[in-house]
Image (cartoon, coloured by chain):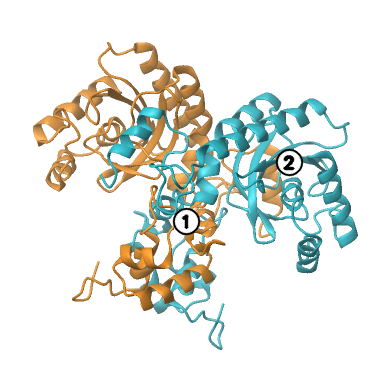
Chain colours: A orange, B cyan
Amino acid sequence: MPTQRDGTPVSVLARQLRILDTFDAGTVFLSLSEIAERSGLPMTTTHRLVAELVEERMLERLPDRSYQLGLRLWELAARTPRAMGLREIAAPMVQFVQGQVRQHTQLGVEGGYDVVYLDRASAPNAVVNATIVGGRISLGASAIGHVLLSDKPRAFLAKIVEAGIRRYTDKTPQTLDELVDVVDRVRELGYSVADGFIHPAARGMAAPIYGPDGRVLAGLGMVVPSGEPVNMRIVELLRSAARRVSQQMRAAYIDPDHPHALPGAKFRVLINSSKSSMEYFEGNEGG
Amino acid sequence: MPTQRDGTPVSVLARQLRILDTFDAGTVFLSLSEIAERSGLPMTTTHRLVAELVEERMLERLPDRSYQLGLRLWELAARTPRAMGLREIAAPMVQFVQGQVRQHTQLGVEGGYDVVYLDRASAPNAVVNATIVGGRISLGASAIGHVLLSDKPRAFLAKIVEAGIRRYTDKTPQTLDELVDVVDRVRELGYSVADGFIHPAARGMAAPIYGPDGRVLAGLGMVVPSGEPVNMRIVELLRSAARRVSQQMRAAYIDPDHPHALPGAKFRVLINSSKSSMEYFEGNEGG
């Protein structure tokens, strides 16, 4: 990102995003002075940018004068095909798998060199898990990450290692050889097992979800206690749930020549609604 | 929004958002010229703004040179407490209710004069339903809307009517008297029934979800076929599911004096994870 000499981003958009980025999963409410402090922007600039963001409903001002991220972000995000369509389709399977195993079940996609987690279902007594919905963990450290890496070339794995994989435990892969070994095993088995890579007590497991183009689109994973032998019933449950999500993703895509194909046309308007709702929307276009 | 004489918004943020708003649930992939046409911005301006949005990962360029909304919007949205926290907590109940009744189950909150729908689960043969996740329907027309209006003053109802309620059918409330009648019935019964207000074949039903402050925070609703007598088993299912979500929302909030309270401190970092994951995060703050 181009910046001025004092580190302030040049583009207005980048400065607005720096304001939004002061909010994180641990800090959902901030005062104006906290936003200024965390963003490193001068108070007058912060004041002006925050006012614009409130005007556009990207930020919301609460009665106690603190701010929170606005519902408009969510409305925009709901139209992000890479995240929301997949998440909608996978949600029943995430809940189902979690209900069977009563540990953590999660869904993740690739975002740069990290897994971005789109969903998670957990039980109160489940094992320790470092995942936050909307959060990131290096592709090299995570079981879902290893599934996502399984259709990438070696050069991409080398870039991940070069960028540096956070060393959560002694077992977290650090070198290219270590990462290649892990990813080769995923290619061979069709699923991943990451024992103690992020926390000594936890084992990540994941299976691939394929997009309509046959590429790995996402990973469906579980976090279970480490140490015990790998439970093949869980492996089969994960793999069959991931296959079912892949089938539904394929069913959601339609031929660009179909009369109801969207402009640009890669999938249906409503990907998990009922037939009669789809007909309703198709009859009310622009309505 | 302040605009120039030709209708172009003055603020850079507003222009960027106009670009993002050219994407909707029916149009998830757009070319540069389609974005320019839909936004009404000159091609050179569009080109520059799109490049900035791609640079900041708010837009993503696809191999066929079309664009889609970027994953970063989703990452920001995942931190929106009003939408995502509630959605996470309610997700198992949305799936459970849908599994019991096999029609549409949905979750909505107030966004201005509309319901904004945060989640929906459906069955392939379910009745017609006009809801899109991330979409809006006037508070006055929707069963979830009537639940949200049930703790609002009459003056707010008058504003909804003044703003105009889209007339989906002959039954959609249009006058203040009609709307007051509908909302009074919700106050009396503790749930809403909207028969044919949006489509003649569909009945909306909803129950209130309360926030920790005791105010109505959201509505949990179903869409079922209209015409038959109201099924009290469904009413009780909805009400008990909504009560359970209210309890969990309350449990997610902690006292601002609690040692693990967040700065500003209204709820926990991880609202639906396991105890050991919460301890892990609390031990790794800033990590």
Query: In the drawing, does residue A36 fall left or right of residue B132?
Result: left
Query: In the drawing, does residue B131 fall left or right of residue B84?
Result: right
Q: Residues within 10 Å of mark 1 (few under 14, many from 20)?
A: many
Let me know if marks 2 and 1 both belong to one chain: yes
In percent of width and height, residue B47 lies at 38, 73
Q: Quarter of the image holding residue A43?
A: bottom left
Asked if residue B195 shows in the view, the reply is no
Disc 1 chain ID: B
Q: Quarter of the image holding residue B233?
A: top right
- Name the residue tied to disc 2: B128
Number of marks drawn: 2
What SS does tag 2 mark?
loop
Up-down relation of residue A192 to residue B185 (above or below)? above
Q: How crowded is mark 2: few (under 14 residues within 10 Å), some or many (20 or more)?
A: many
Out of A133 and A247, give the one closest to the viewer.
A133
The image's mark for residue B10 is none
What SS does tag 1 mark?
loop
Out of A124 and A232, give the one closest to the viewer.
A124
Q: For the N terminus of chain A, give its image quadrant.
A: bottom left
Residue visible at 43% across and 42% down in the picture: B258
Q: For the C terminus of chain A, give its image quadrant.
A: bottom right
- What is the spatial separation of the Cα atoms under label 2 and label 1, in whole angstroms? 26 Å
- Name the residue tied to disc 1: B29
Asked if residue B72 shows in the view, the reply is yes
Say what amino acid the circle numbered 2 marks: Val
Say what amino acid the circle numbered 1 marks: Phe
Up-down relation of residue A158 to residue B62 (above or below)? above
Disc 2 chain ID: B
